[in-house]
Each structure stands twice: as structure tokens, then as C-alpha cells.
């Protein structure tokens, strides 16, 4: 993850430097220079938030079409097998019915039962090899394929639809290899943007609240006080934002998919945490009604796609902000610990002067010197 | 002394606490967390049993419907010939509908794993092992979904569990990845070192019969570093020397610095009568030749004051896995234009019998004798010259004896030691003595105490230092008194230990000059030994990186091994197994392939597979974290280079 973070930061650095460059773009208009400039502009646009977001979305769309092309071919699909099984079974049944009279119920029963048993076993083997009762048009339509691509490169991996063919598997691997770094770049980028804007909002609110408070109390002679340079967004605020976002998702999915609120919440959480258990997938029902593709599932899938992408950005924001705060806290904790340790040492008389080693010039240098002395004594 | 031991104790306790909290403790905590989760989910989910799909009942149901259909059709067609084609079509239609309904039930039941799993099997699905696997997949965010909680409590608990488990797992994986990366780096460098030595060995066998011992070559390389040819050699611009590795092969250069010289003595070899005649062989190149001296007994330069220092040096040697052969490498000063450093003798013989601690009376008597500042300049230059090879630390120590009555051995036995740090912070000691000393001394490389007369106590010189460049050079600068030397050796040991443990590196950004407390030279900056702090190894220098292809190859081989394992274990095809490993390690986790899924999670075999799978995935995630740690900087650099190449970044 650090790789892509580094790359992202590097890219942003590239953006910054490019911006500084763009103003002073020279007049030496070689074709090469122009090409370079073009390249620069393109890459720097690609590094902006819009560029990265667009790149991710277009990558997903491209992947969706690719997977429809690879996986959606009906000749690979299991419905062929099941229809073959159906036809076989019906023919066999008809033969039995034709040969025997219905009146010979016992004999007829035996034969039909045998046939049904065979049918059942065939179906079970087909299902175990991946059939889930849906035709390929139902499964590999465009929004579903988009959802599949999203679940691949965001590492959610619902598993509600998986590639069956060999080429599909290979394509999935390649798609993930390229897509995951791209997604992480997006993640970091969005995280930074969201964090910045959220920080800005928070600061504005903070100032507003504080000013009104102090105005009500007294005129601001503590004006320097709220000029404090770092107002760190508390992690509780991030948590509240996340809770709010998850609640929105919960209500939305519960209304659309007729899931219970708990199931819906469970789905939002496992999706946003990238677990992706996959027992609930929007557009595919969930729980007991799984696999029953509802109508207008396509728009829902696309909205779900957007929901997840934005949610990932929000998570990145929380990650950035909370990391900041935790680092700060750790630093203060460390400082306190060090001071305490030092006082302990002083109380125990650890850092005394050592007469055997006159060190005339460094008596006043304090702690480290005395520590050194004490070590040197050993 | 008691207080000192108390500080030592505190430091030890601190280290132990740090270690436990960083590695073992964290891993144990994660393991405990998952096991607790396993029991929790087992408790929660075991009682919830889905409706069991009884195949015989369903089949009978279907059969009854079929019979009804047939009868109805028969009744409808009673009058006519009932083998009518139309009737057949109608019958087939209805039968097909019936069959499809039957199939739907079947598919549903199979997907919900209720087809061939009765209540007992469903309970066993949430056995301890199964729940453990579920927990692991949740907190690693893989989420196969092969089993999912059915109860409402189970769902809520899953949410809470993941909320705390995921950051914990992330922390643990990062930690493991860090330490694995450190050890991987270390191993890589060791391997490279071996390869380099082997290669050099081959080269050396061709060029010189004296250089058969790789250890010898190491020492030779080090002494070349010492005598100042490092710059040319490092830049690769020097005349080709048979021992010079090709400059394109970077690890070689690095390995030179890994080379563990135990001690080096510099004395005026030009007027050393005891020198073997072979020592005087001329040098072919700016790099002075290395010659192997006969191990004279008088040349056993034991330079460490006491047993502990010896032990330390032995530890260094053991760390670098070098046995200590009893030979002395001497470099002919004739070819070297550096007259202050006439001879470099690298002695690897450590015999405790001749090494004693100098008498405290001798060591505690400072004699402020001005020395020639000129003598100091060359090492400073070296130190600067080596900056492009990375930050390094120079420990200098000096002990001199009055030259009055010691015509035979009044030498300046100087202690130098060098160790290598994993992050290319090489601790190089340059021992020297000023050149305006007794040039008549026939043999200056005297042992510390075995040779020295104790009635002529050594005096410590005030050595002046030219101002260091405010760069990366950290100079520890001591005259040789017993304790000071001991402390130096402690520092050396510390660095060796740091190398071994890989916990950190000496901060290399300080511009620090230490001198002896007795001589009163200025000591700026922090104490070297105390102030090293663990810096994550990814902040290290360019020298310390492992190339990306090797890391990628490592990950790919891990994938391959996993694929083979699952091919053997599960009988999947190679592609499927590879796909499974990739999907798992990238934490996508579709769940179409899950170890033990075909067996239904309840047999013992399936549980073994589950355990194997979870171990594989946790290890694999650690490996991934490690590789991220390793390639991180390289990738950033490559990206920068790429941006430069495009013209995005102006340099």
C-alpha cells in the first residue's frame, strides 16, 4: 500500500511542479518540447482528482465490457447444460409414459423416480460447478459486470458472480493487477481531497463557533488563541461522518432491496470494510431471496457503484485524518513518557556527576551528557 | 556501578517491552483475537439451522405433481387417441414447468448449502476450525462468503468484530512485514556478499595466488578503503584492478563495506624490520597491493583492551560469519603517496593472552602534546570521499607512547575497527598517527600491552580535527584510554547488534565530533551509542535496496508454491489454483474456490485444508506487506525517474 501512496504523493508532487512549470513554459517550441508539454499537461490532468476518478470509472467501464465479451458468451454458460438436462429428462419421461400406461402406477413410479433422481444429481453437479439458476443475460448484463469489476479492483470481492472460463480467470487476474494500484491511487487522492475539504469545513465551523462564543463573552483579546495553526479534526468527527454515510446506505438499501435494516447495515459495513462476504448484493437480492433479480436492478447497481466509490473515498479521508491525530497523540505520549523516565532517573540518582571522569566542558549539557557519562563508567 | 546496571536493566526491559509489543505480543494478540472470535461465532451460529432440504420428500412431491399432470392430460384426451402429438406437446410443457420449479428449489438449496447437509452438518460448518477460518477471512478483509452468519446477532457481532479486528490485523501484518523485510534485506545482502566473494575468488585465483581466501579479499578491500583508494575505486574511474568489481555490479561495492575487518593497525611499515620481504612487493595500480604477511608472533596486533572488547570483536566476526585466520595483511606504503599512512596492517588474530587492559594509571594521565593537524586531514578527506557511498562513521582512536627509550617497539598501536551496518552506515575507523613522529621507529605496530612496557605510560595526544563537512559524517574520535576504548568497542558492538537485529540504524544525519573526555576535545552532538533510535528500515539509503525483480520473483514464487500446494491438496487445476491464490492474496476473495469447500467443512480432512488455507493466506499477506516495504522506495524512485523522463518533473 505504501508503494502506491508513494506513487500518489510523487504524482501530486509532479502536479505541483508542473503547475509551476506551466506558467513559465518557454518559447522554445520544438516539436519535442511541445510534445513534452502536452504529455505533461495530460499526466498532470490525470493526476488531479477528476482525472483519477475518471480513470477509475473508465477503467471499470472498460472492464465491464471486456468481461461481458469474455464471460457473457452463451456457449460457456451453464444454462445450456441445464437445458440439455431438461430435454433429456422430459424425453425419458415421455418415453416411459408412452410405453407404460398411467394405470401401471407402481411401475411408472419407479421409472419416473429414477429419472428424477438422475435429474437431481445432474443439476446438483451443474450447480456445484457454478450454475446459480440465472441465464447469462441476467448475470452478465452491463451494470452487473460493472459491479463485478468494482468488486475486483476495490478488493471487495462479493463473489456473487465469478468468472467461469479460463480466459475469464486470467483476465480477472490481469485486471486486478492493473486495477488495484490504480484504485489505491484513487483512494489516496480522494482521501487527500476529502480530508482537505473536511478540514476546511471543520475549521470554518470551529472558528465560527468559537467567535460567537467569545463575542458573547468578551471581545477577542484571545485573537491569537484561535489563530492556532493546527486545528486537528478529532477522530470522533470522522467517525460521525462514517456513521452518517453508513446510515444513509442502510436506509437506501433497505428501501430498495426490501432487506431488513440490520441486513442492510451489515451489507454496508462489509462492503465499505472491503470484506465483501457476498451474501447480500444489491440488485441480486439477498438472504433467502438471493438470485431473484429484481427489475430496475440496473440503475440500482449503478447507484450502488457510486455509493461504494464515494464511500471508499470517505474511508480514505478518515484514514488520513485519524492517522494525523494518532501520530500527534503518540508523539505527546512519547514525550511524556520520556520526561517521566528522566524524572525517575533523576530521583534515583542515576545521572550523577562522575568524579573519576572530569569532563570540564560538558557539565552543563544536561541529560544526554550525563547519560553518556554513566555509560562510560561501565 | 549499581546504577549503571540499573540503567542497563531499564534499557533491557524497555527493549523487551518494545519487542513484545511490536512482534510477538501483537501476533499473539491477533491470534488470540481470532480464536476468541472463532468460539464466539461458533456459540452464536451453531444453533441456527436452516431448513433442511430433504431430497426424497421433494422428489416425491415432484413425482406426485407429474403424476397429476399425466392423469389430467390423459383425462382431457380420453376420447381421442391419447398419443396425440399435440397432447404430447402440452404434456411436455407442463412437465417442463414442473421440472424447472423442482430445479429452482434444488439450486437454491445447493447454494445455501442445505442440499446434502442436514442439521448436524450445518452445525459442524461452524465448528471451531470453520469459525476460525471465517474470522480470519473477515479480519483480513478477504471475505470468501462460503459461510456467512445467519442470525441477526451473528451479523452484528461480525460488524463489531471487523471494526476492531481489521486495524489490528493491519497493524500486525505491517509489523511482520517490516521485520520480514529487514531479514530479507539482510539475507539478500549476505547472499550477495557470498556471490561477490565467490566471484572475486575466481578473479583472484586468476590474477593472484595470494588472494584465494575470500576473507583475505575482504580484508584487502577494506584496507584499500582505509588507505584511500576508495574514492577512485568507488567511482569506478580508477585503473582496472583485478580485484575491483565491475562498477555495474552494485552489490559488490556494497559488500566491500560489509567486509568485517576486525582490527587494523597503521604503522610505518617502511621502516619495519620485521616485515616480511614479501610485503614489499610493488603495487601495480593506485590501489596498493595486498600482500599476505607471515604471521609473525610480534605482529599479532591485539588492539582491544580487555576481554570484553575481544569478545565484541569476536562477535562482530561471528556476525559476519568469518572465521579468523591468523594472517596479517600489510599494504606496502611505497606505492601509496600517503605518507602518513604508511602501512595498513589488518590483523585478525585475536588472542586474549596478549590483550590486557592498559593500566588505569597509564590511561588516565593525559598529556597534552600538540600533534600535527596535517595528519588528520587525510582521513577527513577519506571520510568525505566516502560520502557518496553513504553516511559513515569514523571512529578514531590513538595511543602513543613516548619514543624515548623504545627504539624497538615504541609504535603507535592504534585501534581501529569497522563494522558494517545494514543500511550502509559503515563504521570505519581510521587509525593514524601523525607523521612527524619518530620515523626511526623500526616497528611501530606494537601490541598494546604484551609488548609495551608499562613503566613507560602512554600519553594521550590532543588531536586536532579539521572541521568536518556538515554532512553525513559522524565522527567518533577518541584517544585510547582503556575505558574510552572499551566504550568504543561497545559502540561497535551496538552497531553489530543493530545489524543483527535490524532494529534500527545509527542516525546518520548528525554532524558530530567526539573526542576523548580526557583530552578535552570538543564533543558536539549526541552520544552515539545512546542516541541511536530505531528508524524503520525503509528510510535507508539507496544502497540498501533490494531490486524489484527479486521481490516480485519472491512473491511470484510464493504464489506458485501456493498453487502447487492447492493443486496437490484440492485437486484443482493449475489455473484454478493460481487464480485462487491470487484472489486470496489480493484480498478480493470471491469465494468460488475455498479450501475444503468440496468436502463441506465438516470432515477432518476439510478442517486440515482450512487450517492450511488460513496459514497460507496469513503468511501470504505478511509476504505481501514485506514486499511492499521492500519495493516502496524503489518504486517511488522509478516513478520519479519516469516523470523526469517524461518531463513532468524538472530536475
Image (cartoon, rainbow, N blue to C red):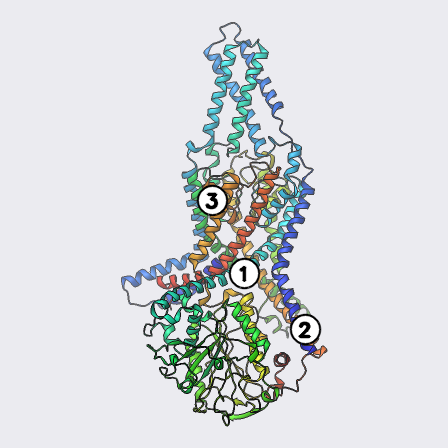
Given the image, what chain letter belongs to the residue carrying mark 3?
Answer: B
Do discs 3 and 2 share a chain? no
Foreground residue, B520 or A320?
A: B520
* Residue B472 pos. (x, y %): 47, 76
**Image quarter for residue A373?**
bottom right
Name the residue furthest top. B79
Mark 3 surroundings within 10 Å by alpha-carbon count, few (fewer than 14), some (14 through 19), many (20 or more): many
Mark 1 lies on a secondary structure that is helix
Pointer 1 residue = B178
Q: Given this view, does label 2 or label 1 mark the residue nearer the observer?
A: 1
Residue behind mark 2:
A341
User: Which SS class for mark 3?
Assistant: helix
Q: Which quadrant of the view contains residue B287?
A: bottom left
Whichever of labels 1 and 3 marks the residue nearer the N terminus, that label is: 1
Q: Position of residue B632 (x, y in %)?
A: 47, 60
Camera-side residue of B288 and B494: B288
- On residue B641, the disc is none
Q: Residue at x 70, y 42 (%)?
A: B43
Q: Nearer the viewer, residue B479 or A76?
A: B479
In the image, taking residue B193 as reference, residue B138 lies left or right, namely: right
Residue at position x 42%, y 66% in the image: B197
User: How far is disc 2 from disc 1 in space, using C-alphas?
Assistant: 28 Å
Mark-to-mark CA distance, 3 and 2: 53 Å
Percent x, y for residue A205? 60, 62
In the displayed structure, B162 sits above or below A103; it is below
Give the chain letter at badge 1: B
Q: Secondary structure at mark 2?
A: helix
Residue assigned mark 3: B578
Same chain shared by disc 1 and disc 3: yes
Amino acid at each position: 500500500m505504501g508503494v502506491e501512496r508513494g506513487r500518489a504523493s510523487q504524482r501530486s508532487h509532479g502536479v505541483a511542479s508542473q503547475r509551476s512549470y506551466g506558467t513559465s513554459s518557454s518559447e522554445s517550441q520544438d516539436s519535442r518540447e511541445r510534445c513534452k508539454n502536452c504529455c505533461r499537461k495530460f499526466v498532470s490532468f490525470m493526476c488531479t482528482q477528476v482525472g483519477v476518478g475518471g480513470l477509475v470509472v473508465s477503467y471499470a467501464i472498460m472492464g465491464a465490457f471486456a468481461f461481458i465479451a469474455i464471460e457473457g458468451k452463451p456457449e460457456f454458460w451453464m444454462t445450456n447444460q441445464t437445458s440439455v438436462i431438461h430435454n433429456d429428462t422430459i424425453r425419458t419421461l415421455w418415453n416411459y409414459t408412452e410405453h407404460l400406461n398411467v394405470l401401471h402406477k407402481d411401475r411408472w413410479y419407479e421409472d419416473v423416480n429414477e429419472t428424477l433422481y438422475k435429474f437431481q444429481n445432474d443439476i446438483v453437479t451443474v450447480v456445484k460447478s457454478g450454475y446459480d439458476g440465472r441465464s447469462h443475460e441476467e448475470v452478465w448484463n452491463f451494470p452487473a459486470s460493472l459491479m463485478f469489476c468494482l468488486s475486483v479492483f476495490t478488493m471487495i470481492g462479493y463473489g456473487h458472480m465469478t468468472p467461469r472460463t479460463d480466459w475469464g480467470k486470467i483476465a480477472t487476474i490481469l485486471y486486478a493487477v492493473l486495477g488495484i494500484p490504480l484504485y489505491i491511487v484513487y483512494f489516496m487522492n480522494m482521501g487527500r481531497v476529502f480530508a482537505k475539504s473536511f478540514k476546511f469545513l471543520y475549521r470554518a465551523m470551529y472558528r465560527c463557533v468559537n467567535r460567537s462564543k467569545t463575542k458573547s463573552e468578551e471581545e477577542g483579546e484571545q485573537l491569537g488563541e484561535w489563530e492556532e495553526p493546527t486545528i486537528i479534526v478529532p477522530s470522533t468527527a470522522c467517525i460521525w461522518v462514517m456513521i452518517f454515510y453508513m446510515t444513509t446506505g442502510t436506509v437506501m438499501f433497505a428501501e430498495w432491496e426490501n432487506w431488513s435494516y440490520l441486513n442492510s447495515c451489515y451489507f454496508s459495513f462489509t462492503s465499505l470494510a472491503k470484506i465483501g462476504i457476498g451474501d447480500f448484493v444489491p440488485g441480486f437480492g439477498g438472504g433467502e431471496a438471493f438470485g431473484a433479480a429484481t427489475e430496475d436492478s440496473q440503475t440500482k447497481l449503478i447507484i450502488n457503484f457510486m455509493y461504494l466509490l464515494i464511500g471508499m473515498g470517505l474511508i480514505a479521508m478518515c484514514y488520513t485524518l485519524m492517522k494525523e491525530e494518532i501520530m500527534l497523540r503518540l508523539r505527546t505520549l512519547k514525550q511524556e513518557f520520556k520526561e517521566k523516565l528522566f524524572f525517575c532517573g533523576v530521583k534515583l540518582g542515576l545521572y550523577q556527576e562522575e568524579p573519576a571522569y572530569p569532563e570540564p566542558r560538558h557539565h552543563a549539557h544536561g541529560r544526554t551528557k550525563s547519560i553518556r557519562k554513566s555509560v562510560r563508567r561501565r | 556501578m549499581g546504577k549503571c546496571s540499573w540503567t542497563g536493566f531499564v534499557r533491557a526491559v524497555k527493549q523487551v517491552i518494545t519487542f513484545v509489543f511490536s512482534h510477538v505480543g501483537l501476533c499473539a494478540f491477533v491470534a488470540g483475537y481470532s480464536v476468541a472470535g472463532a468460539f464466539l461465532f461458533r456459540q452464536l451460529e451453531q444453533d441456527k439451522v436452516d431448513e433442511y432440504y430433504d431430497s426424497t420428500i421433494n422428489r416425491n412431491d415432484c413425482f406426485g405433481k407429474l403424476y397429476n399432470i399425466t392423469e389430467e392430460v390423459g383425462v382431457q384426451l380420453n376420447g381421442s387417441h391419447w398419443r396425440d402429438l399435440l397432447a404430447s406437446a402440452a404434456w411436455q410443457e407442463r412437465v417442463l414447468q414442473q421440472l424447472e420449479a423442482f430445479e429452482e428449489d434444488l439450486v437454491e438449496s445447493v447454494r445455501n448449502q442445505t442440499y446434502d447437509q442436514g442439521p448436524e452438518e450445518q452445525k459442524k460448518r461452524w465448528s471451531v476450525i470453520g469459525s476460525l477460518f471465517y474470522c480470519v477471512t473477515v479480519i483480513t478483509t478477504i471475505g470468501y462468503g462460503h459461510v456467512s452468519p445467519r442470525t441477526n446477532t451473528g451479523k452484528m457481532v461480525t460488524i463489531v468484530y471487523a471494526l476492531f479486528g481489521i486495524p489490528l490485523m493491519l497493524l500486525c501484518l505491517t509489523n511482520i512485514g517490516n521485520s520480514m523485510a529487514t531479514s530479507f534485506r539482510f539475507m539478500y545482502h549476505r547472499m550477495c556478499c557470498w556471490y561477490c566473494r565467490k566471484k572475486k575468488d575466481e578473479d583472484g585465483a586468476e590474477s593472484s595466488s595470494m588472494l584465494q581466501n575470500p576473507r583475505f579479499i575482504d580484508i584487502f578491500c577494506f584496507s584499500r578503503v582505509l588507505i584511500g583508494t576508495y574514492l577512485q575505486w568507488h567511482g569506478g574511474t580508477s585503473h582496472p584492478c583485478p580485484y575491483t568489481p565491475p562498477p555495474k555490479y552494485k552489490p559488490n561495492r556494497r559488500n566491500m563495506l560489509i567486509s568485517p575487518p576486525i582490527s587494523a593497525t597503521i604503522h610505518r611499515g617502511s621502516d619495519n624490520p620485521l616485515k616480511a620481504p614479501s610485503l614489499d612487493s610493488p603495487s601495480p595500480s593506485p590501489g596498493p597491493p595486498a600482500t599476505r604477511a607471515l604471521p609473525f608472533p610480534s605482529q599479532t596486533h591485539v588492539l582491544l583492551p580487555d576481554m570484553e572488547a575481544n569478545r565484541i570483536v569476536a562477535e562482530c566476526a561471528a556476525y559476519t560469519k568469518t572465521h579468523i585466520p591468523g594472517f596479517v595483511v600489510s599494504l606496502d606504503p611505497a606505492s601509496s603517496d600517503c605518507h602518513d599512512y604508511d602501512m595498513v596492517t589488518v590483523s585478525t588474530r585475536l588472542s586474549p593472552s596478549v590483550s590486557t587492559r592498559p593500566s588505569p594509571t597509564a590511561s588516565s594521565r593525559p598529556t597534552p602534546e600538540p600533534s600535527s593537524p596535517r595528519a588528520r586531514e587525510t582521513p577527513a578527506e577519506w571520510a568525505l570521499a566516502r560520502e557518496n557511498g553513504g553516511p559513515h562513521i569514523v571512529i578514531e582512536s590513538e595511543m602513543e607512547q613516548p619514543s624515548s627509550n623504545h627504539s624497538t617497539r615504541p609504535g603507535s598501536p592504534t585501534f581501529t575497527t569497522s563494522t558494517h551496518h545494514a543500511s550502509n552506515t559503515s563504521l570505519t575507523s581510521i587509525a593514524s598517527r601523525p607523521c612527524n613522529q619518530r620515523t626511526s621507529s623500526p616497528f611501530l605496530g606494537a601490541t598494546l600491552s604484551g609488548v609495551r612496557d608499562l613503566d613507560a605510560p602512554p600519553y594521550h595526544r590532543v588531536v586536532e580535527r579539521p572541521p568536518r563537512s556538515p554532512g553525513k559524517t559522524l565522527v567518533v574520535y577518541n584517544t585510547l584510554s582503556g575505558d574510552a576504548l572499551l566504550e568504543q568497542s561497545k559502540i561497535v558492538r551496538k552497531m553489530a547488534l543493530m545489524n543483527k537485529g535490524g532494529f534500527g540504524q545509527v542516525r546518520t544525519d548528525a554532524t558530530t565530533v567526539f573526542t576523548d573526555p580526557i583530552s578535552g576535545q570538543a564533543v558536539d552532538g549526541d552520544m552515539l551509542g545512546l542516541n541511536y533510535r530505531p528508524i524503520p528500515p525503509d528510510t535507508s539509503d539507496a544502497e540498501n535496496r533490494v531490486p524489484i525483480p527479486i521481490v516480485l520473483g519472491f512473491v511470484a514464487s510464493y504464489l506458485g508454491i501456493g498453487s502447487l500446494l492447492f493443486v496437490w491438496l484440492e485437486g484443482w487445476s493449475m489455473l484454478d489454483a493460481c487464480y485462487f491464490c491470487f484472489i486470496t492474496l489480493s484480498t478480493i476473495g470471491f469465494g468460488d474456490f475455498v479450501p475444503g469447500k468440496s468436502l463441506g467443512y465438516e470432515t477432518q480432512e476439510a478442517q486440515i485444508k482450512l487450517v492450511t488455507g488460513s496459514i497460507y493466506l496469513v503468511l501470504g499477506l505478511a509476504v505481501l506487506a514485506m514486499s511492499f516495504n521492500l519495493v516502496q522506495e524503489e518504486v517511488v524512485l522509478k516513478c520519479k525517474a519516469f516523470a523526469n523522463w517524461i518531463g513532468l518533473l524538472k530536475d
